[in-house]
Amino acid sequence: MSIEQNIAELRASLPGHVTLVAVSKTHPAEAVARAYAAGQRVFGENRPQEMRQKHDLLPADIEWHLIGHLQTNKIKYIIDFVSMIHSADSASLLLALEKHAARAGRTVDVLLEIHISAEESKQGWHAEELDSWLRTGQWRQLEHIRFRGLMGVASNTGDESVLRAEFGSLASLRLRLESEYFGSGFDTLSMGMSSDYRLAVDCGSNMVRLGSLIFGQRDYTAR
Ligand SMILES: *Cc1c(COP(=O)(O)O)cnc(C)c1O
């Protein structure tokens, strides 16, 4: 199957309210260009410098989403064009983003990444920690950040009941934070990858992040 065919099939099979983020990390700009030719406009990358390089080579109407952990010293590579950051996982990162976005004269859409998996290594806020920061009200002063919703990475397991529980917890947390803090613009639920996106959509996802299903396996040794 070609990249073009993969994009066409996914776009035909996903419900209309679900945004497809094509995760192009590790794949060359030519691969992104092929997906673009098939009509795809939203791409996800996990490394700021790699995203910057592809951005500079590719059409300007691409929406670039950062999905990987962001270090504050790398914000500068992407702040002038990034359209959404899925991986806002700490107050200090949000404060730094606010400063850079204000300086760049931009307002950036941000998702709060929540730790939903049982795995130790996965990043993201724990719900209690996020709640106590939100209660400080500091987020209200971040005028160049638009809080748009939540992102989560589920456990790497084939156990459907575990995945449903994790996706379900993210969906209900979004609902609660929408009503307690953010209001109706807090409408995005980024969950689901190649292995689990159908289940994620079933559990209320409206943004899926798919890499290998579109571009094939990633070759990390080649980079
Ligand atoms: C790499 C990555 C994806 C895509 O993974 P696939 O299994 O290739 O679909 C999705 N989300 C995040 C956060 C990633 O790092």
Image: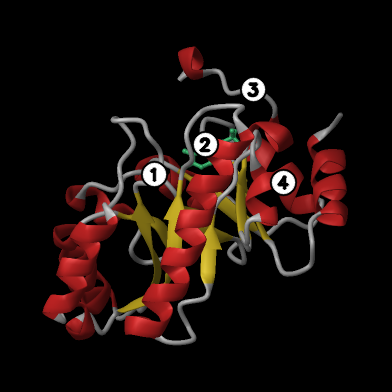
Sequence order check: which comes first, mark 4 or mark 2?
2
Residue matched to label 3: 217
Q: Residue at x 34, y 47 (%)?
A: 115
Q: How is the image coloured?
A: secondary structure
Q: Position of residue 56 (x, y in %)?
A: 49, 52
Q: Nearer the viewer, mark 2 or mark 3?
A: 3
Residue matched to label 2: 25
Label 2: state its secondary structure.
Answer: loop
In the rendering, which numbered label is found on residue 68? Answer: 1
Q: Position of residue 127 (x, y in %)?
A: 28, 58
Farthest top residue in view: 221
Sequence order check: which comes first, mark 2 or mark 3?
2
Image quadrant where residue 122 sits: top left
Q: Residues within 10 Å of mark 1 (few under 14, many from 20)?
A: some
Sequence order check: which comes first, mark 3 or mark 1?
1
Q: Residues within 10 Å of mark 4 (few under 14, many from 20)?
A: some
Disc 4 + disc 2, Cβ < 8 Å: no
Q: Position of residue 187 (x, y in %)?
A: 52, 75
Q: Nearer the viewer, mark 3 or mark 4?
A: 4
| Mark 1 CB lies closer than 8 A to ligand 1 | yes
